[in-house]
Image (cartoon, helix red, strand yellow):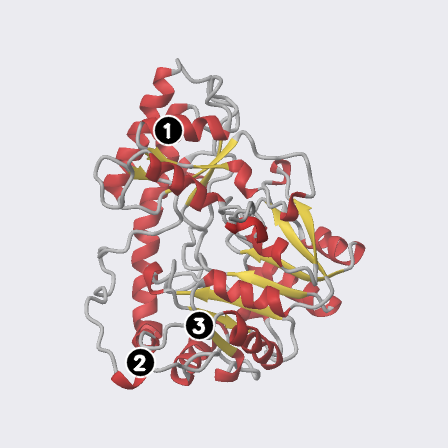
Amino acid sequence: MSNFPATSSFRSVPKTGVIYVMHRANALGFSYGDPAWANLGQGSPETGPLPDAPPRVDTLHLDPANHRYGPVQGQRPLRQAVADFYNHHFRQGMASQYTWRNVSIAGGGRVALTRLAAALGDVNMGHFLPDYTAYEELLATFKSFVPIPILLSSREQFRIAPPMLEREIVGRGLSALLASNPCNPTGQLVEGNELAEWVRIARDNRCTMILDEFYSHYIYTENDGEGPKMVSAAAFVEDVNEDPIIIVDGLTKNWRYPGWRVSWTVGPEEVIETVASAGSFLDGGANNPFQHQVVPLLSSGVALQETVAVQATFRQKRDYMLTRLDEMGIVVPQPPQGTFYCWADLSQLPAPLNDGMQFFEAALQERVITVPGVFFDVNPGKRRSNARYQHFVRLSFGPEMAQLERGLDGLARLVAKQGSAAPHANGRAKVGAMR
């Protein structure tokens, strides 16, 4: 018998931050639908009916012809529907328009981003800190590019001004940049003239900008126009086949169908062809039978009605969470302008609850799931020995209100057990600050 274990040929692959916390919760008895638990950790929106939202899809009609393999880049009608969506909402009156050739369909956001990472060449790839936990292993696995972190400071409200962004791109020799907008976990948003400047900087410096726009309909800033506000860099692209802007989105968050695992990548035709080539060996293509079911969801009427309902419901939940956290002495330095997360600073709580990992473990005893802030210190390959955001935790107001209330009640009990929270800090962000 061999003395070598079967796994000796494999490297250790860490779980992403959210998967880790769900694994720990499962070990303590968590299961989906268990009314004793509150999941304020996983990045999933409530998927049931919302007031004034379109009816939820409850029946799927499958064409037997779609049981066979589909095109790696996705079915053409869906690709065209995605292009039409961006042209209608962000590019009306512009000479350059997206077509189906500018769109690739994939099996969820991680697959779309993995295709892009696999297709990148030998470049310096910038990414922000903090940002989405799954970026860490993605940036570490593919060796053709060098991931270079750009630190966002709490002093600057976890934002970067366009002149500083351009300085980072030029000074660090970045040929690509990956960012979520709105940002997961901070909820901060780049929009309007600022987003236009980001696109201009990418164009002038030939820096490929990959923007994860999965939360781009969860917007809480002032809206000067008619209808709900949706934010996309597509609005500022001059030439869809020349500007180095790549957008990734899908049904997961903005349409509240995470289980469908349907996403899309929008960009120059040449990039889309390369991404499809990567998909041919990575995943073979998205779910084929579901794709024709997605087309009606992208119609303007359905998308706008869904966005109106999402923003009304999730703004209410955001404000409720901010109020409850303030009462507990948990600081949210900047109220989220988008997403459905609060990036909460625990430093004013008594020890050990002022540490994100300790807070997470203690909250599990109250059957509440959170995500420690250290998981958003994206550190590909563990090249840095120091860690950041130990005093932060990400809290999701994605679940329905009853679960949100139950979870915040559990956190309030936890804080109360440790004694009175520290006095309120001067200048703490208030609930109405973004109204």
277 relative to 423 in the view: left or right: right
At label 3, counting other C-alpha atoms closer than 10 Å, the crowd grade (few under 14, some 14-19, many 20 or more) is some
Nearest the viewer among 246 and 278 is 278
At label 1, counting other C-alpha atoms closer than 10 Å, the crowd grade (few under 14, some 14-19, many 20 or more) is many
Give the image location of residue 217, x and y in percent.
Answer: 41, 59
From the viewer's perspective, is residue 244 above or below residue 41?
below
Q: Which mark is residue 197?
A: none
Q: Which residue is mark 3?
A: 89
Which residue is at 50% across, 22% downward?
Answer: 348
Between disc 2 and disc 1, the foreground one is 2
Q: Secondary structure at mark 3?
A: helix
Amino acid at dot 2: His
Q: CA distance from mark 2 to mark 1?
A: 44 Å
Q: Secondary structure at mark 1?
A: helix
424 relative to 301 in the view: left or right: right
Amino acid at dot 3: His
From the viewer's perspective, is residue 308 above or below residue 74?
above
Q: CA distance from mark 2 to mark 3?
A: 33 Å
Give the image location of residue 114, x and y in percent.
Answer: 54, 63
10 relative to 22 in the view: left or right: right
Which residue is at 52% across, 69% downward?
Answer: 282
Nearest the viewer among 249 and 182 is 249
Q: Which mark is residue 67?
A: 2
Q: Which residue is mark 1?
A: 363
Marker count (numbered):
3
Q: Secondary structure at mark 2?
A: helix
At label 2, counting other C-alpha atoms closer than 10 Å, the crowd grade (few under 14, some 14-19, many 20 or more) is few
Sequence-wise first label, 2 or 3: 2
Amino acid at dot 1: Ala
Sequence-wise first label, 3 or 1: 3
Which residue is at 65% across, 47% downward?
Answer: 381
